[in-house]
Amino acid sequence: MVTRNTKQKEFVLNNLKNKFDHPTSQKIYDDAQKQGIKIGQVSIYRILNNLVEEGLVCKIVTKDNVAHFDFVRKNHIHLVCNNCNQIFDKNLGNDDNLTELINEFNISMQDVILYGICKNCKNNKF
Ligand SMILES: [Zn+2]
């Protein structure tokens, strides 16, 4: 039982590590099905929430109330468009004041999400 749980957790974590498109738990479930991995949707959701609690994964909820997940990468924040619900990645540069602060800090959990209207939607005036 323990081995199985560890395997499932590894699958979810590796799935997120290899992706940069902020998948939903449904998308991770679809990948598991494709790869023939035995794991239920409820298990995936539970594992995801555990990983968020452990600070390995961050949860990004868009305005349409859909939860997306991403592997926590250092000095990396998210911007969410409230109009098209797209998630944008922003890597902080070495000379950013925030990066300096982050490097001095012992991070146990990362949850930096900026909400607004993206350039595309702004230009199309919604
Ligand atoms: Zn947008």
Image (tube, rainbow, N blue to C red):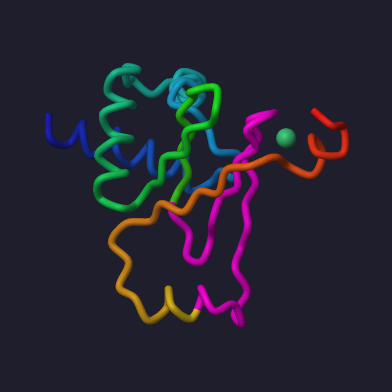
Give x and y (percent) for residue 123.
Answer: 87, 39
* Magenta-colored span: 72-99
Q: Please, is residue 19 above or below residue 66 in the view?
A: below
Q: Residue furthest left?
A: 1
Query: Measured along the vertical axis of the image, is residue 66 above or below residue 108?
Result: above
Can you say whether 95 is above or below 16 in the image? below
What is the residue that sits farthest to the front in this orientation?
125
Question: Total number of numbered labels?
Answer: 0
Figure check: 66 above or below 16: above
Q: Residue 26 at what x, y percent from top left?
A: 46, 20
90 on left or right of 118? left
> In this rendering, would 4 be left or right of 60?
left
Residue at horizontal 29 percent and vertical 18 percent from the top: 42
Residue at 45%, 29% (x, y): give it: 67
- The foreground one among 19 and 65 is 65
Q: Is residue 21 left or right of residue 46?
A: right
**Does the magenta-highlighted stretch encompass residue 94?**
yes
Residue under the image location 38 percent in, 47 percent down: 57
Give x and y (percent) for residue 78.
56, 50
Q: Quadrant of the C terminus?
A: top right
Q: In the image, is residue 113 part of the stretch drawn in magenta?
A: no
Q: For the N terminus, which image quadrant?
A: top left
- Furthest toward the right, the residue is 124
Residue occupying the point 32% across, 26% down: 45
